[in-house]
Image (tube, rainbow, N blue to C red):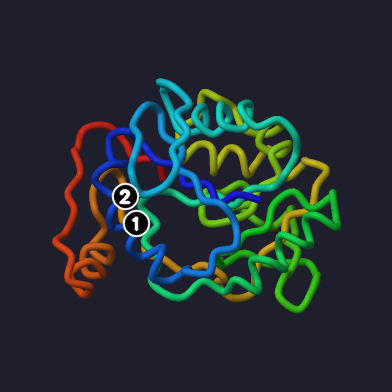
Amino acid sequence: MKVVIFGSDKYLSTLMPAFARFFHEYWPDCPWPVEVVSQTVTVSEFPTVCTGPDENFSQQVLRYVEMNPGDEPFLMLLDDYFLTEPVNTEVVEHAYQVMMDSPQVVHVNLWVIGGDVWRWEYSDHLGEFDKSQCNWLFQNQAGIWRPRLLRDVALPTEDGWRMETQGSKRARSYPGRFLTVYENAITYTNYMGRAAPRQEGIDWLIQNGIEPIYPPQEGGSSD
């Protein structure tokens, strides 16, 4: 498995120094290789894979999947997910092992989403979503993805928001199992929202002695 950080060319160079600082501080024992995925921009903090110019987030993700044949799960993060607590590596390893042992499991959410329910307890750390009740089966918060789920459900014409909302509707009829942690395995502040910094993210930077980051305002973010 790889930890894959997706970023937009518009924001990546600006956000990555802070992302890398918190990543190394709160996940120093990350046992998997880490790489950044951008359109054309490279960064010095992590190895970078460029997918080429694209029009939206889902197209970037699908191009990355096309570049990596097979069905090896990967852990998706976004470049504005600034960690705020130590990562529970034990739970992440457990989630990965569950996916390796159970091919029918296509996604494990590592960030608790309020309001959703699981049908039954899958393991000590994981529950299974009731697909008929869950509105966020296909969402871009921290999680482990099986590439075939993205190939089968994602559409290259959707931005990040539509990829989540419309993809979740399509995923309800997908023949796979969707799991979630009971407690966050990866905790972070989602810095950008609607192409502008969120106040909670600004406060987190200030608390840690970092000047607030104000990326270019034109266009949308990848979240």
Give the residue drawn at x 52%, y 67%: 186
Left or right of 57 on screen, residue 149: right
Query: In this rendering, is residue 186 above or below 102?
Result: below
Q: Amino acid at mark 1?
A: Phe
Left or right of 148 on screen, residue 29: left
Element assignment for label 1 = helix
Query: In this rendering, is residue 35 above or below 21?
Result: above
Element assignment for label 2 = helix
Q: Which mark is residue 129?
A: none
Q: Which mark is residue 19?
A: 1
Percent position of residue 202, x then y: 21, 63
Give the residue drawn at x 54%, y 64%: 30
Percent position of residue 41, x then y: 33, 31
Give the residue drawn at x 36%, y 49%: 45
Percent position of residue 125, x then y: 71, 75
Residue nearer the viewer, 31 or 8: 31
In the picture, the quarter occupied by the C terminus is: top left
Residue nearer the viewer, 86 or 60: 86
Q: Quadrant of residue 218?
A: top left
Task: Find disc 2 in the rendering and name its residue.
Answer: 16
Q: Quadrant of residue 22?
A: bottom left
Q: Residues within 10 Å of mark 2 (few under 14, many from 20)?
A: many
Labels 2 and 1 touching (C-beta < 8 A): yes
Residue nearer the viewer, 5 or 178: 5
Query: In this rendering, is residue 88 above or below 2?
Result: below
Q: Residues within 10 Å of mark 1 (few under 14, many from 20)?
A: many
Give the residue drawn at x 51%, y 54%: 141
Q: Amino acid at mark 2?
A: Met
